[in-house]
Image (tube, grey):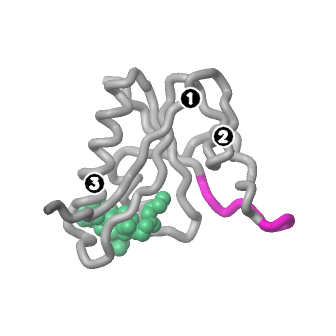
């Protein structure tokens, strides 16, 4: 029997400039988007997220993506440190629209990070 220790998902756009209801920013056709990164609370700080991230990046490269983006909450310091240490930078692209479930008037509190997958 296998135990689930963490999750991560990669989505990608089939057309240019897709605006996705899953909070994906305007996404070039050759860019992947990472979502749902989480590790079991009892198993953190053992490098599992780093392995999940690397596997997602490998998969994105294999399907022809030249970059990968993600949204991270501005107060989520552990996740921001994870992504920065793995080579992600603050994306200069436009911020995504607030998700559909967000209450009117609430501010979008995530920043978009990006990593090139070339070379
Ligand atoms: C963020 C999260 C996925 C990290 O998982 P993890 O398996 O513990 O991370 P790793 O052990 O692979 O750590 C890799 C790097 O992330 C950073 N990091 C992870 N946890 C950290 C913490 N509590 N504080 C500061 N930096 C942290 C470090 O840079 C670390 O590298 P180092 O060990 O060489 O210092 C995990 O804390 C989690 O599931 N959080 C709740 C869900 C969440 O916020 N997901 C992100 C959504 S964008």
What label does residue 47 carry, if any? none
The residue sitting at 53% across, 58% down in the picture is 72
Q: Is residue 109 magenta?
A: yes
Q: Cβ–Cβ below 8 Å for labels 2 and 3? A: no
Looking at the picture, how far across and down is residue 86, in whole percent?
Answer: 33, 48
Q: Residues within 10 Å of mark 3 (few under 14, many from 20)?
A: some
Marks 3 and 1, how far apart at CA: 24 Å
- Which residue is label 3 attached to? 50
The circle on residue 20 is 2
The picture places residue 77, in percent across and down from the top left corner, at: 46, 69
- Proximity of marks 2 and 1: CB atoms separated by less than 8 Å: yes
Q: Earlier in the sequence, mark 3 or mark 1?
A: 1
Chain part drawn in magenta: 103-111
- Looking at the picture, tell me which residue is in the foreground, 45 or 36: 36
Please state if 11 lies on the left or on the right of 103 as rendered: left
Ligand 1 under 8 Å from disc 3 Cβ: yes
Q: Residue furthest front?
A: 1
């Amino acid at each position: 029997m296998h135990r689930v220790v963490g999750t991560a998902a990669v989505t990608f756009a089939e057309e240019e400039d897709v605006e996705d209801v899953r909070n994906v920013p305007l996404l070039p056709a050759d860019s992947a988007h990472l979502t749902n990164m989480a590790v079991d609370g009892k198993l953190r700080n053992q490098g599992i997220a780093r392995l999940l991230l690397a596997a997602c990046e490998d998969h994105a490269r294999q399907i022809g993506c030249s970059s990968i983006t993600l949204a991270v909450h501005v107060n989520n310091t552990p996740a921001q440190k994870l992504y920065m240490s793995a080579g992600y930078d603050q994306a200069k692209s436009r911020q995504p629209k607030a998700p559909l479930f967000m209450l009117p008037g609430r501010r979008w509190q995530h920043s978009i990070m990006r990593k090139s997958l070339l070379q």
